[in-house]
Amino acid sequence: MSERVKLQNSYDPTKELTVKLSASYIAGVEAVFMDYVTKMENPGNIKPMIEKFEKYIEDPEGTLKNNPFTQSELHFYTLYSLIELFKAAAYAQGANIDVNATVAQDDISALLKASLEGDSDEMRKINDRINKDIESQLS
């Protein structure tokens, strides 16, 4: 007879949690989200996916009934909603900091183009260039 393995706890999804955490989680979860985006088969799908999330927020029952989340969308929604929740809390608590930096419109356009073409390597290169540009402005 096979050995029995105890299942992990389950959690009541109707309960709300109160959690204190560092605002650094915003950037961390955003980085994880962007990593997933750059690894998508077609990163151009992120825009319609986010639009679906926004519709879900407005009408949870109707949206899911007519257009349920795929497993991939469910994972992205979890990250997306955490980011939005953390940002709202940061603003409400005055933890947001105005960043005195700009991004080149050409880089934004190139990033969008690479995303729509599903070119993950190009997206990573552009993101790296944007991040270096921002870092140079802030130092």
Image (cartoon, rainbow, N blue to C red):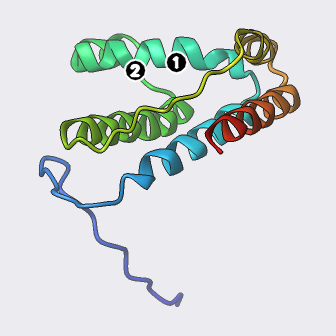
Compared across the picture, whether 63 is left or right of 94 comes to: right
Q: Amino acid at mark 2?
A: Phe
Q: Amino acid at mark 1?
A: Met
Whether 11 is drawn above or below 98: the answer is: below
CB under 8 Å between callouts 2 and 1?
yes
Secondary structure at numbered mark 2: helix
Crowdedness near tag 2: few (<14), some (14–19) or many (≥20) residues, C-alpha within 10 Å: many
Between 91 and 65, the one nearer to me in the picture = 91
Whether 104 is drawn above or below 34: the answer is: above
Label 2, on which residue? 53
Between 4 and 70, the one nearer to me in the picture = 70
Q: Residue at x 49, y 32 (%)?
A: 99
Crowdedness near tag 1: few (<14), some (14–19) or many (≥20) residues, C-alpha within 10 Å: some
Residue occupying the far front of the picture: 139
Label 1, on which residue? 49
Q: Position of residue 128 (x, y in %)?
A: 78, 37
